[in-house]
Image (cartoon, rainbow, N blue to C red):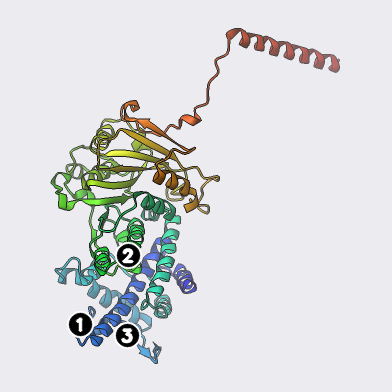
Amino acid sequence: MQSHINRITDILRRDDGISGAMHYTEQISWILFLKFLDDYEQAQSLEAKLSGKSYTPLLDLPHQRDTRAAPKKNGKIDSMHAMTGDDLKEFVNRDLFPYLKSFRNESTDYHSMKYKIGEIFHFLDNRIESWHTLREVIDIIDTLSFQKQSDLFELSKIYEDLLQWMGNDGGNSGEYYTPRAIIHAMVQCVDPKIWETVYDGATGSCGFLIEAYDHLKQQTKTTEDLSWLNHDALRWNEKTPIAYIMGVMNMILHGIENPNINKKNTLTDDIRGFEEKDRFNIILANPPFWGKEKEQIQANFPIKTNATEMLFLQHFIKKLKAGGRAAIIVPEGVLFNTSRGFQDVKKLLLEDCNLHSIVSLPAGVFLPYSGVKTNIIFFDKTKATEEIRYYEVEPWRKLTKNKPITTQDMQGMVDAYRSKKIWEQSWTVSINDIKDYDLSAKNPAKNKEIKHRNPQEILKDIEWGQEEITSTFSALKKSLS
């Protein structure tokens, strides 16, 4: 299957309408999604038939794959009747896409598969310029199968690689991808339990939710557990169209047929109106940072600031249930910035939550998208903060695009966090020792002891040095004469 995806990406790179990893990942996504939908429909139809029931397909006959794009003969594409040339492009651009987009307006159930289809294609367009490219990609993807769970599992791993390549491509595409090693470490530390709800308000490609899903799935014992996990455990928002598409596709490939994702800007919610039913047991997120929000967005928050990361932090504090746990990635500036808005938000965090742990991540974690230094803050809704444990993650090598952070790099921190022990790269700070809400990590072990010498000793060293210089100069002068 990997070889098929590699062939598709190579083909798309050569198309005049595709520019960069973001575009070819986006285009692979919609074609993969329609193949998944075709296999899904076939499985639903067969299941209904075996149960003596009828099944009404989501797509009408003229828009099903087997009708025009991929008609079959003896189980393979019938090349004599499959669409080619400008007819294929016209069908995709002027018929298929408008038809799929219309599902968004026709369905009143926002959580239905039909509405999700309409939502996905509402923000999509076909970028493939050459009908030859389109035909070739459709033919290759048609050889893939989503009928078995093992097929979905393999494809989901390949799709994760595509998303990582998109992140490594740099530019804006990197903001949708958090390194898997960091996500894995955060989930291991927070350790979600079955029947605990999980939330991400800036989901990107859904890496946190997928990791949490896999973590929770290992704990399921009954059909009720599994049903709850697939339908009610995970909630998230994403405002960027391309990230929304990638996230939905990524979740579907990992086995969640109808993901609970909202296409919205999380910061448009007025956090003063949150009730207990709106809150979650677990929050995992890597919200966008260094953005600036307008006054109408700031009006939704008691503490006014235009810094996106501080608005998200307020949102997450209010979204966490009593007793809940959170792990959030923030830029290092959040820790040391002592301007009024930053101080007020950190005061809220320390007083309303127990900010018990801060992990300093190494520089280069988000290269090439960003070289900014970042931290993970861990807090819960149990009590006010009394002390903070700090951890430094320091790989033995410099992190680069081609040498990213690994699970092994994070394991020491995870072990120390879970055992609640202080290790060689960690220390604790009492809340009473924190001034002006400066939470920056200053490892005391790295503060070299300064030895104050006697002034007379310093003068003697200077005199000795002068004597050495005079002697050397005299010898050099003598040798030259």
Q: Are marks 3 and 1 in contact (CB under 8 Å)?
A: no
The type of residue carrying mark 2 is Met
Near mark 1 (Cα within 10 A), the count class, few <14, some 14-19 or many ≥20, is: few
Alpha carbons under labels 1 and 2: distance apart: 24 Å
Amino acid at circle 3: Asp
Using the rendered view, name the quadrant where residue 150 is placed: bottom left
x then y, percent, for residue 448: 52, 26
**Dot 2: what SS?**
helix
Q: Earlier in the sequence, mark 2 or mark 3?
A: 3
Front residue of this view, candidates 25 and 435:
435
Label 1: state its secondary structure.
loop
Q: Is residue 450 left or right of residue 63?
A: right
Residue pictured at 31% horizontal, 82% vertical: 65
Circle 1: residue type: Thr
Left or right: residue 331 versus residue 303 is right
Name the residue tied to disc 2: 251
Residue 320 position within the rendered picture, expressed as x and y whole percent measured from the top left: 23, 47
| Rendered image: mark on residue 187 | none
Q: Is residue 223 or residue 336 the one in the foreground? A: 223
- Give the residue displayed 29% in from the left and 57% down from the top: 240
Closer-to-camera residue (313/183): 183
Mark number, residue 66: 3
First in sequence, mark 1 or 2: give its number: 1
Q: Position of residue 374 (x, y in %)?
A: 40, 42
The picture quadrant where one finds residue 177 is bottom left
Residue 56's tag is: 1
